[in-house]
Amino acid sequence: MKKVRVRFAPSPTGPLHMGGVRTALFNYLFAKRHGGDFLLRIEDTDQTRYVPGAEEYIVESLKWCGISPDEGFSVGGELGPYRQSERADIYRDYALKLVESGNAYYAFDTAEEMDTLRKQYEAEKKTFVYNNKTRQTLKNSIALSDQECDAIMATGAPFVVRFKMPENETVTIDDAIRGTVSFNTNDLDDKVLFKSDGLPTYHLANVVDDYMMQISHVIRGEEWLPSLPLHALLYKALGWGDKTPVFAHLPLILKPVGKGKLSKRDGDKMGFPVFPLEWEDPKSGDISMGYKEQGYLPEAFVNMLAFLGWNPGTEQEIFSLGELAQAFSLEKVGKAGAKFDPEKTKWFNHQYLAATDDAKLADMFLPLLKENGVEAELAYVAKVIALVKERATFVADLWEQSSFFFVAPEEYDAKVVKKRWKNQVPGQIADLTELLKGVEDFSSENTETVVKEWISSNEYGMGAIMNAFRLAIVGAGKGPHLFDIIAMIGKDDTIARLEKAMDVLPK
């Protein structure tokens, strides 16, 4: 097999949707699996939809995910430029070659004329299609004589170049995911290849670029499947039939509830991001949620994306990026749409957070501690993290799960107070406080032994004492092993919290 070279070619028309990130990821994984190259190309031929900041957003999003291009507009390479707006002359030359070979033609129809024609068809409850049935009646170089065409072009009137779709041909292509797919050219229109603004459309530009950049496999979303016959015919028309890449069309990412493709609207409605990073619209100022800012770890986000349409065929669900590259294959990518599950995404994040090094998590947690007025040593915070991270899904959850390690409770859970702080319990807690004042070894193991022996020898209820003890230390019925907590906060703080609870809670 020739060297694998794949590309991700987004348009800078706004933030990069998670579906786009998945396309980049699958291309990246395929390249790494086969020792190939992953290219990043910007397809900015539609200048009317260009959004400032979108290119930078694409680069930063892929960087956050750990998807590093080997070649492309952000890193350079020998086959650039990798931004299509900088390659206009190249596309113009190929568009003219297609006209000269009879595979394309000039069309002089104005936007107003086309709009009028469409409305006429609509009035007759028909759909206008610029194809082999209508082209002869329109203003183009097929219907007009050479002299008429020359006269129009001499005036400087705008024109486009359209592909001349062959009549009554069956285009059959083997898709690496969907198998053999066939199209009849009579069902296809004569797409515009080169626009009046001097730039190509996606169809011409991507075929020319893929050929010139030696792309071996085109792995892209299902929405491009209808364009496949045109692209295959363009390779043939340009004389590159033997260089046609392998095509693979990925399944759609579907919304969690109902039918249809996942959209930003679904995320806004259900409260989850659909973009990797937060995005501020440069026109409206509207801010869209990002996975990074919502507290997701990039490894968890990538792992989740990999399972949207791909399955390793094993029970394993947690994969590093390197492990994904080793396991990935197009044969294991499904045809059916993949339903996005926000709760499963949280599950992935919990798995990664729980597996993250305590010191690294502590470093991530320090800014949140400072926001809550807490200054603490990293080593102490890391020990706290080790005790509570299994209970957290996000770094932001760590404060809720661990605040009592840093500050004494100011309030007490009313339901727990009512259930646990009653009858003879306050008096027993007073005796427990005196017991702990005499304990020198305040390690978790020793205090647990001392307290539980005391409870047993006095024939107290273990649950009654321990739950009230936890309420006094934590302020609620939550938290890790109680004796680990008091060992961390120390003897003085433990005694102070017990005495405070006895002062403020009902006797």
Image: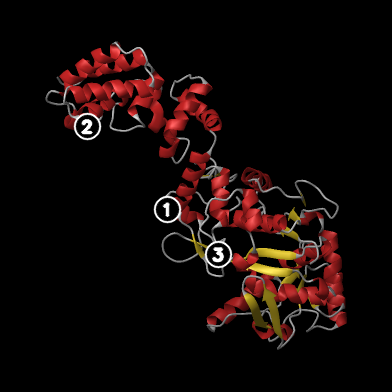
- Marks 2 and 3 in Cβ contact (< 8 Å): no
What's the colour scheme?
secondary structure
* Element class at badge 2: helix
Image coordinates of residue 453 in percent, x first then y, are 25, 23
- As drawn, is 243 to the left or to the right of 50? right
Task: Give the alpha-carbon distance from disc 2 to disc 3, as whole Å.
Answer: 53 Å
Image coordinates of residue 195 in percent, x first then y, are 75, 66
Q: Could you classify mark 3 by the number of other residues whose Cα lies within 10 Å: few (under 14), some (14-19), or many (20 or more)?
A: many
Instruction: Between residue 148 and residue 488, name the one nearer to us.
Output: 488
Image coordinates of residue 146 in percent, x first then y, are 87, 81
Image coordinates of residue 442 in percent, x first then y, are 37, 17
Q: Could you classify mark 2 by the number of other residues whose Cα lies within 10 Å: few (under 14), some (14-19), or many (20 or more)?
A: few
| Viewer can see residue 44 | no
For mark 1, what is the residue? Answer: 269
In the current view of this chain or complex, which residue is farthest to the bottom? 168
Q: Nearer the N terminus, badge 1 or badge 3?
A: 3
- Quarter of the image holding residue 299? top right
For mark 3, what is the residue? Answer: 252
* Element class at badge 1: helix
